[in-house]
């Protein structure tokens, strides 16, 4: 009889331990992201994008790392947007190289290459061919502010109702930090990838119009 009680007690202890392990494991599981089926979240995102579209002149400075699709590299980045035109300054301390890319509708100019300034109609292609940095510039100016570029997209939101993951143009963009002092809030860490291509941005300072 005592042996039966010991076996029963042993089973109870094992069951209790298993339940405790499940509880602890559940506590470690990341909270699920909210998908774009939520019309209220999508409406809030649309309103964010409407406000951002009114702020046509903005800039940020920070750090960038680019890989895949060319030589790539890492360093400082300063982006200045003036309506449909922009200027991006890149500096890579390891290679001691720096470039300045200015572009508008149908034109682009790259300064900082050995053979002198280069011009073309495609800013992304110009930067990739001459400097080896492959960045989706046309879409990045929307993504970096937590907005969708034109085209179909899939969004997931975090617990605060801000974008956490965006899929668009064959890219997946993750937002891993926000400056919520800004209205609307602006991303601080933007990680984008498409196949072997990677672009990682860490924003040190935002200067949005009216921000």
Image (cartoon, rainbow, N blue to C red):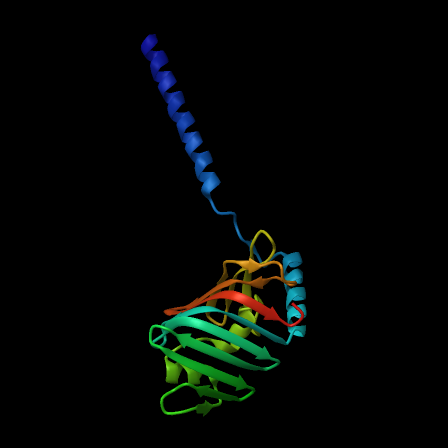
Q: Is residue 29 above or below residue 155?
A: above
Q: Residue at x 38, y 87 (%)?
A: 113
Q: Residue at x 65, y 65 (%)?
A: 48
Is 118 or 194 nearer to us in this picture?
Answer: 118
Q: Is residue 49 above or below residue 71?
A: above
Q: Position of residue 192 (x, y in %)?
A: 45, 66
21 sits left or right of 152 in the view: left
Q: Position of residue 105 (x, y in %)?
A: 56, 87
Q: Quadrant of residue 20?
A: top left
Q: Position of residue 49 (x, y in %)?
A: 64, 68
**Quadrant into which the N terminus falls:** top left
Q: Residue at x 40, y 30 (%)?
A: 18
Q: Quadrant of residue 111?
A: bottom left
Q: Quadrant of residue 60?
A: bottom right
Is 91 or 53 nearer to us in this picture?
Answer: 91
Q: Position of residue 195 (x, y in %)?
A: 39, 69
Q: Residue at x 54, y 74 (%)?
A: 141
**Quadrant into which the C terminus falls:** bottom right
Q: How many dots with numbers? A: 0
Q: Is residue 68 above or below residue 39?
A: below
Residue sticking out furthest to the top:
1
Residue sticking out furthest to the left:
3
């Amino acid at each position: 009889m005592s042996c039966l009680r010991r076996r029963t007690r042993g089973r109870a202890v094992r069951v209790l331990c298993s339940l405790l392990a499940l509880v602890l494991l559940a506590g470690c599981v990341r909270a699920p992201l909210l998908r774009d089926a939520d019309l209220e979240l999508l409406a809030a995102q649309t309103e964010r994008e409407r406000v951002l579209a009114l702020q046509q002149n903005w800039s940020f400075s920070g750090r960038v790392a680019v890989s895949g699709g060319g030589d790539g590299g890492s360093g400082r980045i300063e982006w200045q947007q003036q309506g449909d035109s922009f200027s991006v300054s890149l500096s890579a301390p390891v290679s001691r190289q720096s470039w300045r890319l200015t572009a508008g509708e149908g034109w682009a100019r790259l300064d900082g290459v050995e053979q002198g300034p280069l011009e073309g109609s495609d800013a992304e292609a110009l930067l990739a061919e001459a400097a080896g940095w492959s960045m989706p510039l046309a879409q990045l100016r929307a993504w970096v502010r937590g907005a969708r570029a034109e085209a179909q997209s899939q969004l997931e939101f975090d617990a605060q109702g801000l974008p956490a993951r965006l899929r668009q143009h064959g890219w997946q963009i993750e937002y891993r930090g926000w400056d919520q002092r800004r209205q609307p809030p602006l991303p601080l860490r933007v990680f984008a990838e498409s196949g072997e291509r990677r672009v990682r941005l860490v924003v040190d300072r935002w200067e949005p119009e009216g921000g």
